[in-house]
Image: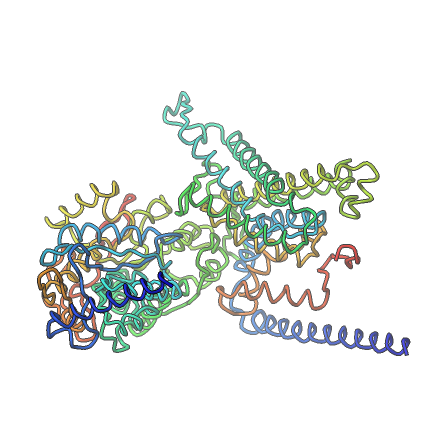
């Protein structure tokens, strides 16, 4: 009897799986057909426009990826979704904004230009300072977020942590609104990072502007991601983090200070979010209390798409999501307001075919 | 037991008192539909306002309610009773609009509504005021549909989007000589409605509409939709929406390959706040608005506004003067129907609704208010402004 039961269960699983794959393939074929129509038949856009789409997608994707890593790191270690992560990024963006503001009003007269301010007199130092302040604020808020909101609930069911995280997110958002006011603030960059300055690329006889701010953000996020990868794979702290991710109790028995590792994980993910926040301010130019919310949700999506808990997966997911958002509506020939629909449809599609995400591994019993 | 008895007696006494009073002195006019608002000595007459007081669009709500408070200090006396503004936050959206309307109509001293501010919230609120017999005078809800549904209570002294859109299309086609126009909007009742009107009229005049794109409001990166628009090589870009999105678009136009393209916005982008967000990128941007030239009553109001708020009038939004007029007109209508009897002021609601609709030649600071049968009360049209040297200046 038992044997038949298990075979029928296996059969059921097999049917479900093939159904899923079938649904995935059907939707995939439909999307490809639609893309073919737009790209080859209708030919709405020239090559230069596609380059522009791709560029804006990559820049956005770089920032999504940085934030997504924060989600994935915390999930990998604590198996919780830190929904306040977007708000940590927003605090970092404010840190960068206020640093620029302070330096802009700091006079640094030179012989040729007596009206010069510090921001333009020493642009590299200013940018460095802005990142330092933003990263510091985010790292500190990440640390205290864990200490105050999550640590007392370490032993509680995971659902409670999730609710706490949402609560922390709402708290931080409103805190920032009351502190800094609800209006969007203009981030004024040093002149060398002027938002409409950049290299010009000629694609099919048309000039495509590659903004310095975009390239700067992309390069910096790539650098930080590589740095993080090295940290996790090559250092002692990284090894401790990986061991805690695998099994907290055994790691503790082997002499790893679990609380300390968790704290440091929050500091690292906060620092990355802070860097993303400052970049966001520099590239987009507007900051308010709501700045972190949407990117946070998007980055969470990216982390799930890439396989939550997996660091290269988060990077891949972030980049993919950014590019899909920028290219998707045009490639499918629909309205740009529907870009989120496309992004989330792709997410559903990925999850149908690979429930654990693109690079995600199968979750063990213990992690579930 | 004793307590229950006491309570019952009290309630009965109150009921008797209320009935007795009403039966004894209520004027004839209160027998009409909707009855009367009964304001006792010491109570205030409530005029409502509702708009976004928090969030991205909060400057509109804050600005308009400030102007209205000044109007109440200037005109707020109805036969010895004081008028008070009941200011609520609806966030601009439909859900908030309906919630605020329900809250306000539950107040028996609430008689008229100087709002709502946004078209979305207004559309949701109209049916609720319709049932309660509350006349409305919105200074800023400009969606054309609002006055086509046969509402008895809804009036506005804002110019409609249709009027503005036709004016804008004409200006772009004839004055600016643009032949290829791209349109963008934020998907809101206001923005999309406005963009549609411009699109239809521009095409009807013989111009070519090369793109019609929507953006998601509240985001800080619109480079992808802008690149799509740029590929169509328009000579001008018209945007239906508010300044939060417009400032992002204007800032990213050059990046996206739209340098040298004229940006033309609706009345939603006019104001000093837009200038602060776009800086030098804003040079040459057009906008429509009702802001009148500085006559004496306006200068006097501007001074009062500056004294009261510490901000110059018109910095936050373009609806300041209209808001002042809306409240002034409503109070005038209340004055014309209110009946004082001893210690009680009766305001017949049905008569007030008709009085507002019948408003004629009310001389406000921003223009004359004369209501048509459908509730359109603005007798003057839009004016076009352009950003010159970092400030709005009347366009040729």
Q: Residue at x 86, y 74 (%)?
A: A6
Which colouring convention does the figure follow? rainbow
| Left or right placement of residue B365 versus residue B180 in this view | left
| Left or right placement of residue A50 versus residue A159 in this view | left
* Pick the front one: A88 or B3: B3
| Location of the C terminus of chain A (image quadrant) | bottom right
Please say whether residue B238 is visible from this viewpoint.
no
Locate residue B65, reporting x and y percent. Answer: 26, 53
> Quadrant of the rendered structure where residue B32 is?
bottom left
Locate residue B245, reporting x and y percent. Answer: 40, 55
> Quadrant of the rendered structure where residue B265 is?
bottom left
| Location of the N terminus of chain A (image quadrant) | bottom right
Q: Residue at x 41, y 27 (%)?
A: A106
Please say whether residue B79 is visible from this viewpoint.
yes
| Left or right placement of residue B213 versus residue A354 in this view | left
Instruction: Check the image and report above or below for B29 versus B383.
Output: below
Instruction: List the single residue furthest toward the top.
Output: A111
Locate residue B361, reporting x and y percent. Answer: 9, 65
How many marks are shown on the rendered structure? 0
* Pick the front one: B254 or A288: A288
* Pick the front one: B372 or A251: A251
| Left or right placement of residue B34 versus residue A105 in this view | left
Locate residue B8, reporting x and y percent. Answer: 31, 66
Q: Residue at x 69, y 68 (%)?
A: A352
> Quadrant of the rendered structure where residue A37 is?
bottom right
């Amino acid at each position: 009897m038992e044997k038949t039961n298990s075979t029928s269960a296996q059969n059921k699983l097999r049917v479900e799986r093939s159904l899923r794959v079938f649904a995935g393939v059907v939707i995939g074929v439909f999307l490809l057909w639609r893309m073919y129509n737009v790209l080859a038949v209708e030919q709405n856009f020239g090559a230069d426009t596609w380059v522009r789409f791709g560029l804006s997608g990559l820049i956005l994707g770089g920032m999504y990826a940085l934030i997504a890593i924060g989600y994935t790191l915390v999930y990998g270690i604590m198996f919780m979704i830190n929904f306040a992560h977007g708000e940590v990024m927003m605090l970092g963006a404010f840190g960068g904004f206020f640093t620029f503001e302070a330096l802009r009003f700091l006079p640094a007269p030179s012989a040729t230009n007596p009206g010069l301010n510090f921001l333009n007199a020493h642009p590299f130092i200013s940018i460095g300072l802005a990142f330092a302040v933003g990263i510091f604020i985010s790292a500190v808020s990440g640390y205290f977020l864990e200490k105050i909101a999550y640590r007392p609930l370490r032993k509680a069911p995971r659902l409670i942590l999730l609710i706490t995280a949402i609560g922390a997110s709402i708290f931080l958002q409103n805190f920032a609104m009351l502190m800094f006011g609800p209006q969007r603030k203009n981030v004024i960059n040093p002149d060398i990072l002027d938002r409409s300055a950049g290299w010009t690329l000629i694609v099919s006889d048309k000039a495509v502007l590659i903004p310095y701010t975009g390239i700067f953000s992309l390069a910096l996020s790539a650098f930080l991601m590589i740095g993080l990868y090295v940290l996790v794979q090559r250092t002692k702290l990284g090894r401790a983090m990986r061991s805690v991710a695998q099994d907290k109790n055994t790691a503790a028995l082997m002499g790893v200070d679990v609380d300390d590792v968790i704290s440091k994980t929050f500091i690292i993910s906060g620092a990355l979010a802070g860097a993303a926040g400052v970049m966001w301010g520099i590239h987009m130019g507007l900051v308010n209390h709501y700045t972190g919310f949407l990117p946070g949700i998007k980055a969470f999506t990216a982390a799930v798409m890439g396989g939550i808990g997996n660091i290269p997966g988060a990077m891949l997911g972030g980049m993919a999501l950014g590019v899909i958002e920028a290219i998707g509506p045009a490639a499918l020939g629909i309205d740009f307001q529907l870009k989120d629909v496309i992004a989330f449809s792709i997410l559903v599609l990925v999850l149908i075919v690979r429930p654990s995400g693109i690079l995600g591994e199968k979750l063990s019993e213990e992690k579930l | 037991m004793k307590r229950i008895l006491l309570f019952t007696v009290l309630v009965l006494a109150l009921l008797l008192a209320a009935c007795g009073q009403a039966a004894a002195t209520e004027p004839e006019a209160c027998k009409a539909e909707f009855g009367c608002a009964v304001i006792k000595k010491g109570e205030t007459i409530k005029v409502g306002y509702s708009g976004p007081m928090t969030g991205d669009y909060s400057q509109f709500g804050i600005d308009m309610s400030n102007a209205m408070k000044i109007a109440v200090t200037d005109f707020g006396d109805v036969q010895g009773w004081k008028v008070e503004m009941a200011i609520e936050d609806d966030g601009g959206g439909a859900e908030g609009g309906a919630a605020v309307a329900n809250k306000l109509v539950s107040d028996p001293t609430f008689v008229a509504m100087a709002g709502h501010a946004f078209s979305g919230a207004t559309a949701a609120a109209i049916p609720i005021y319709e049932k309660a017999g509350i006349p409305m005078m919105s200074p800023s809800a400009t969606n054309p549909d609002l006055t086509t549904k046969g509402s008895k209570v809804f009036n506005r002294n804002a110019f409609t989007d249709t009027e503005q859109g036709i004016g804008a299309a004409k200006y772009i086609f004839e004055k600016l000589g643009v032949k290829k126009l791209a349109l963008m909007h934020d998907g809101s009742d206001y923005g999309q409605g406005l963009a549609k009107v411009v699109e239809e009229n521009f095409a009807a005049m013989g111009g070519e509409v090369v793109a019609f794109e929507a953006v998601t409001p509240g985001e800080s990166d619109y480079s992808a939709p802008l690149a799509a628009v740029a590929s169509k090589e328009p000579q001008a870009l018209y945007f239906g929406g508010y300044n939060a999105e417009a400032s992002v678009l204007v800032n990213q136009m050059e990046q996206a390959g739209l340098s040298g393209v004229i940006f033309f916005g609706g009345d939603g982008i006019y104001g000093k706040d837009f200038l602060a967000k776009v800086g030098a990128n804003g040079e040459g941007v057009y906008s429509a608005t009702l802001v009148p030239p500085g006559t004496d009553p306006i200068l006097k109001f501007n001074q009062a506004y500056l004294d009261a708020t510490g901000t110059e009038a018109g910095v936050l939004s373009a609806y300041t003067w209209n808001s002042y007029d809306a409240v002034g007109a409503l109070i005038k209508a209340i004055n014309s129907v209110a009946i004082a009897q001893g210690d009680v002021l009766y305001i017949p609601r049905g008569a007030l609704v008709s009085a507002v609709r019948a408003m004629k030649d009310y001389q406000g600071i921003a223009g004359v208010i004369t209501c048509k049968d459908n509730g359109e009360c603005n007798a003057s049209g839009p004016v076009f402004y352009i950003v010159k040297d970092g400030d709005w200046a009347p366009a040729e």
